[in-house]
Structure formats: C-alpha cells, structure tokens
C-alpha cells in the first residue's frame, strides 16, 4: 500500500477502526490526522495511536493526499460545503464511508470533478473482520483504487462493485447483516433460558456456537454452506427436526423479504 497523508474528517467508531487497522499493519501514524469537534475524542485517538489530532477540517483536508469523510450522513452536507469553500481538491482522493449520500450528491457538494470513492463498511470492521463494498466511478485511477482497497483491507475484506446502486445490495447483505445474526442469537439465547439455563450459560452457549459456525464457514471457503449444514444434520435427528420448523415457517423467504426491505430503505435514503 502506498504511503500517503490521510485526513479523517470525523473521529468516531469507524474512523477509529480504520486507523487502528492501519497502524497495526505498520502504516506510519505520522501520516494520519484525525479531525473532530470534540477535543476528548481527538485526543484519545492521538494518544492511543500516536496520530495527529486537529479541530480544523479544512486545514486537515488541505494538507492531506487522501480525505476520509467519516461523519454521520446528516452532517455530510454541512461538512462538505465548508470543505468546498476552503480546500483545493485537485490531485486528492476523497473517500466516503457514509450510507445514503450518493455520488451525484457529492458532486453537487464538492464539485463535478471530485475524485471520490464510496465505501460501505460494517461494524465487524471494529474487530478487523469487516466486509466493505467499494464503488469508484470510471475516472478513478488504478493507484487510487489500490490505495482504497488497501485502506479497507486493514479492517477486513473488500469487494469492488460494478455500479453505484450495488452499494444498497452491500448494505442488505453485509452492512446490516450483523444485526440479523444478533437477532437470531438473541432468540436462541432466550429459548435456552426458557429451557432452564441461566442467562450467563445461555449467552455462552449461543455465542460459542455462532463463533464456531462462523469459523467453520471461514475455514472451509470452498464448501457450500448447504454442505456444512448437512454435515450436522442426520436424517431423522435433532437438527433435522429443528430445520424442518425453519423450513415450514419459510425462513428463507423471510430473510429474502428482510434483505429487500433493507435495499428499499437504502434507496429511499439516497
Ligand atoms: P460516530 O458517531 O461514531 O462518529 C462521527 C464522528 O464525527 C464523531 O467523532 C464526531 O465528533 C465527528 N463529527 C461531528 N461533527 C463533525 C464535524 N462538523 N466535523 C468533523 N467531525 C465531526 O459515527 P460512525 O459510526 O463512526 O459513522 C461514521 C460514518 O460511517 C457514518 O457516515 C456512517 O453512516 C458510516 N458507517 C458506519 C457504520 C458503522 O457500522 N458504524 C457502517 C457503515 C457506514
């Protein structure tokens, strides 16, 4: 990964996750600046990762090669307007991790020629297990694409998207997905308690089963999920009895409907 000066506009959870991943990979901390209005947050990151911390978005962006827009979507317009007035973006790469702010909106805010890549990460990025979708319009250079993939590769896996609207599919399949798994785990934990386990034991049973299943899937990338499922399902056995209930209640269709609802909501937000 090329070494460039990076300014993070916004010092929240996602910025912290990416900075943490970069620094852990040996990216020079002195090339990283974080910018946020609250001193406490900035200083915490500066102390923990030895990065620079400032309170002036425009000065941070002006002196950087790469500007990472890491504020909440509802603040994006104000932040961009201020940057547009004060920063010369020519030659810079701009990365946005915000949901719901599309490229044409960024062009309206930062100028038609803005060199911008959209990134859709998810919360497991906080533990280095993220899944990020990346979308770059045609004119973004190979070097800028490689840099972006390297940056997000520091916190997990990346996937280039063929068209901007695929970002909404990424939201449904990966961005919002941790919550689907947590919901299933919550329901399982509750039923384990109903069956007589105390909360702590029920939580341990379900977490460990989920971690184990995820790791089995990760360690067997060439094995279809259906095969992994069949490996724990003997004919007429206990797992088969449980899966039959999921099937009768049309779990697959419910999941499909839920994912479509996420896509629809993402489209409405743009
Ligand atoms: P967060 O609330 O933790 O962080 C936002 C940061 O922006 C804070 O440090 C805040 O101090 C700072 N900020 C507020 N006003 C500012 C301003 N005017 N100038 C500069 N900084 C300012 O949010 P987060 O979870 O890190 O999310 C950041 C972005 O990442 C959002 O756009 C969100 O849509 C996107 N995102 C987050 C996730 C996630 O799972 N957390 C997933 C995908 C995308």
Image (cartoon, grey):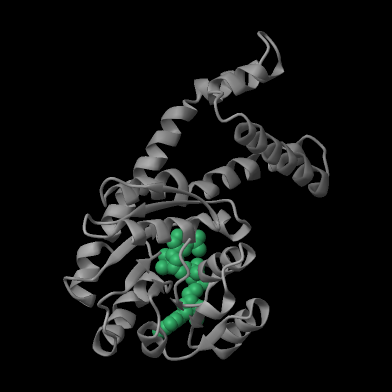
Q: Quadrant of residue 95?
A: bottom left
Q: Is residue 64 visible?
A: yes
Residue 28 coordinates in the image, percent (x, y): 57, 73
Q: Nearer the viewer, residue 258 or 224?
A: 224
| Quarter containing the C terminus | bottom left
Q: Nearer the viewer, residue 195 or 149?
A: 149
Relative to 177, residue 29 above or below: below
Q: In the orientation shown, which residue stands out farthest toward the top?
A: 235
Q: Nearer the viewer, residue 14 or 235?
A: 14
Residue 180 coordinates in the image, percent (x, y): 53, 44
Judged left or right of residue 55, residue 266 is left
Q: Quadrant of residue 76?
A: bottom left
Q: Quadrant of residue 206?
A: top right
Relative to 165, residue 33 above or below: below
Residue 66 coordinates in the image, percent (x, y): 39, 73
Relative to 38, residue 223 above or below: above
Judged left or right of residue 222, residue 78 is left
Q: Nearer the viewer, residue 139 or 36?
A: 139
Judged left or right of residue 11, residue 87 is left
Image point 57% across, 22% down: which residue?
A: 245
Residue 128 coordinates in the image, percent (x, y): 60, 55
Image point 64% across, 76% down: which residue?
A: 49
Image point 54% across, 86% down: which residue?
A: 53
Q: Is residue 9 visible?
A: no
């Amino acid at each position: 990964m090329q070494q460039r000066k990076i300014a993070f506009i916004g010092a929240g959870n996602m910025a912290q996750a990416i900075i943490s991943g970069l620094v852990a990979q040996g990216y020079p901390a002195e090339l990283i600046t974080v910018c946020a209005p609250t001193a406490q947050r900035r200083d915490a990151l500066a102390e923990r990762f030895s990065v620079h911390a400032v309170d002036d978005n425009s000065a941070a962006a002006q002196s950087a090669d790469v500007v990472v827009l890491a504020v909440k979507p509802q603040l994006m317009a104000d932040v961009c307007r201020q940057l547009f007035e004060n920063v010369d973006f020519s030659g810079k790469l701009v990365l946005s991790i915000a949901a719901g702010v599309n490229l044409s909106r960024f062009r309206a805010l930062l100028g038609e020629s803005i060199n911008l890549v959209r990134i859709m990460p998810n919360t497991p990025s906080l533990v280095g297990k993220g899944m990020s979708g990346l979308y770059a319009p045609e004119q973004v250079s190979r070097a800028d694409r490689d840099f972006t993939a390297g940056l997000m590769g520091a916190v997990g896996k990346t996937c280039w998207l063929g068209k901007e609207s695929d970002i909404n599919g990424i939201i449904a399949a990966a961005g919002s997905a941790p919550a689907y798994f947590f919901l299933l785990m919550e329901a399982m934990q509750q039923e384990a308690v109903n069956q007589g386990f105390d909360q702590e034991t029920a939580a341990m049973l379900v977490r460990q089963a989920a971690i184990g299943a995820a790791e089995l899937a990760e360690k067997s990338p060439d094995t279809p999920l259906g095969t992994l499922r069949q490996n724990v399902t003997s004919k007429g056995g206990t797992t088969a009895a449980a899966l039959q209930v999921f099937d009768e209640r049309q779990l697959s269709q419910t999941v499909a409907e839920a994912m479509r609802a996420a896509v629809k909501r993402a489209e409405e937000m743009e």
